[in-house]
Image (cartoon, rainbow, N blue to C red):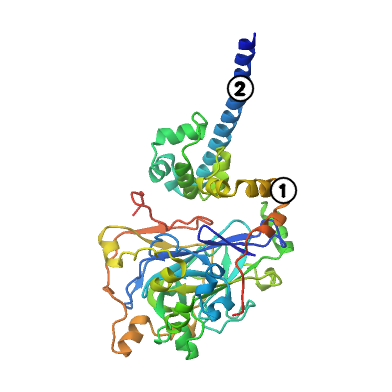
Amino acid sequence: MIFGFTRQRHKKLDEKYNMYYVLYMTHFGSTIRTQRESLRREDRRFSLRQVAQRIGVEPAYLSKIERGDVAPPSEATTIRLARELGENPDVLLALAGKVSSDLQEIIRKRPQLFAELIRQMREAPDDAILRVVREVRDGDW
Amino acid sequence: MIILENDCLDIRCPEVHDHAWCGIEFQRTLRIPDDGEDHFLPPGLGCFPLRHLDDYAERLPGEWLSRGGVIMPMFQAEALWIGFDADSYPFAIKIATGKICALTGESWVDHLNTDPQDYLVLPEQPWLDGYCVEKGIVRQFVAMPLGEGYTAEEQLQGAAQHGGLQIVAYPMKRERYEKMSKEIGQDDYLASYPEMDMGLAPGGRMQQEIYEDPYGLDAWDQRHPSRCFVTIANSVQWMAITGERPPIKPPTARDYTDAGLPWFDYYDADAKAVSGSDVLKNLKSVKQTGEAKGGAPLPENESIGVSRVVSLQDTRGRKVREYAAGEAVDS
């Protein structure tokens, strides 16, 4: 029975994992399709084919991404897609269930400090978070 | 407040409105020929790197440090354009070089003026490539050493004091924005070489309209300025200060054109352009100043015959002048 329990646990984990997976695929895909089509209404360079060509993927693959049929693309492709569509790369990566490699590197260097900082800021309003962000100092000129 | 994000100035005014945000970037570009002809808009070749000046405090002259802001590398005779990004929240932006307003040629003041208009309005204005010398014509921003008489500042003030670029941004007043939204439904080493400061000078002529403020002076919240001094370092200074290599030199306008790559033309059918500044119109270009001194300060300044021009309409919030290898563009 332990064996059965373990299998069931795995199944539940798989279901949970798949649920997130489907959620990411669907939300990510619909977001980029909505934005691309909005841009295409004013500029035909935002056709599926031309956008796919500019970010270096096959049009059929981009179509599947938009429909949520496949998982979101790699970090590099997601960033190219964000820039192409005028979206924030970090926002699109988050929709894809990812954290950019530069942010991972920053956290890896001082994991305890940044984990604590992020948890402290979890519920803080935007203006409170911006107060801890480093400002460009204005001087006397 | 201004923060530095991926080599862009990210300006936010959460004390005014959660939506009050705009971005400013400095794009590397081709230097257009300074030959008296009116050229099309050159492409963007990627952002110049920007760093906090304070990060290199021990290597900088005290005068540079006192100005605060950021530092950016440019080669002598290299050109730049300034790109603006904004969503729906309007901003008024003043741009000066050496504390000379790039739109009027007047000396720097923090506040906004309308007669003549000395600021740009976002999101209407996507870019600024140079000094507004005539209606629909700018002279390209070109980096030159201070102290040799090329810069706008030296020509108008008779002295090389400031150099660099100066920016102040004002968000629209909260009440005005909300009303409008409802209506529309939505180091020591360096201290010994002060003569190496860099400034911006007027280069070749280019077709670019600076748009009139469609909202009026009263729309801007001048109680909440965001200011920044952008110090320009030459490549030797940049490496000595930051330890980083500057970006490689951009291609020449001729090489770019001969490769069949596109130039750009932009228009906004709904916007009115401001008149150019007579003060700026009378400035000598880098080539003219150089010739008067018996020199030739601009290498590879041959005229070009452009055959491929991409016409761009108003695509607000999008940086459409960036060219990526292999990108399909329409001619």
Residue with the mark numbered 1: A120
Q: Residue at x 51, y 42 (%)?
A: A37
**The N terminus of chain B: image quadrant:** bottom right
Three-letter amino acid code of the residue under disc 1: Gln
Name the element at disc 1. helix
Three-letter amino acid code of the residue under disc 2: Glu
Q: Looking at the image, is mark 1 or mark 2 nearer the viewer? A: 1
Residue A16 visible to the viewer: yes
- Is A132 displayed left or right of A105 in the figure? right
Residue with the mark numbered 2: A15
Q: Residue at x 52, y 31 (%)?
A: A68
Mark 1 — on which chain does it sit? A
- The one nearer the camera, B278 or B18, is B18
Asked whether the residues under the numbered discs 1 and 2 touch, taking CB atoms below 8 Å apart as contact, a structural biologist would say no
Q: Is residue B330 above or below residue B47?
A: above
Total numbered circles: 2
- The one nearer the camera, A107 or B268, is A107
- Quarter-of-image position of residue A3: top right
> How many C-alpha atoms fall within 10 Å of the one at disc 1: few (<14), some, or many (≥20)?
few
- Is B89 displayed left or right of B16 in the figure? left
Ranked by sequence position, the earlier of labels 1 and 2 is: 2
Coordinates of residue B186 in the picture (x, y in percent): 66, 51
Coordinates of residue B238 in the picture (x, y in percent): 43, 70
Name the element at disc 2. helix
Coordinates of residue B162 in the picture (x, y in percent): 51, 82
- The one nearer the camera, B9 or B72, is B72
- Is B34 displayed left or right of B158 in the figure? left
Residue A42 visible to the viewer: no
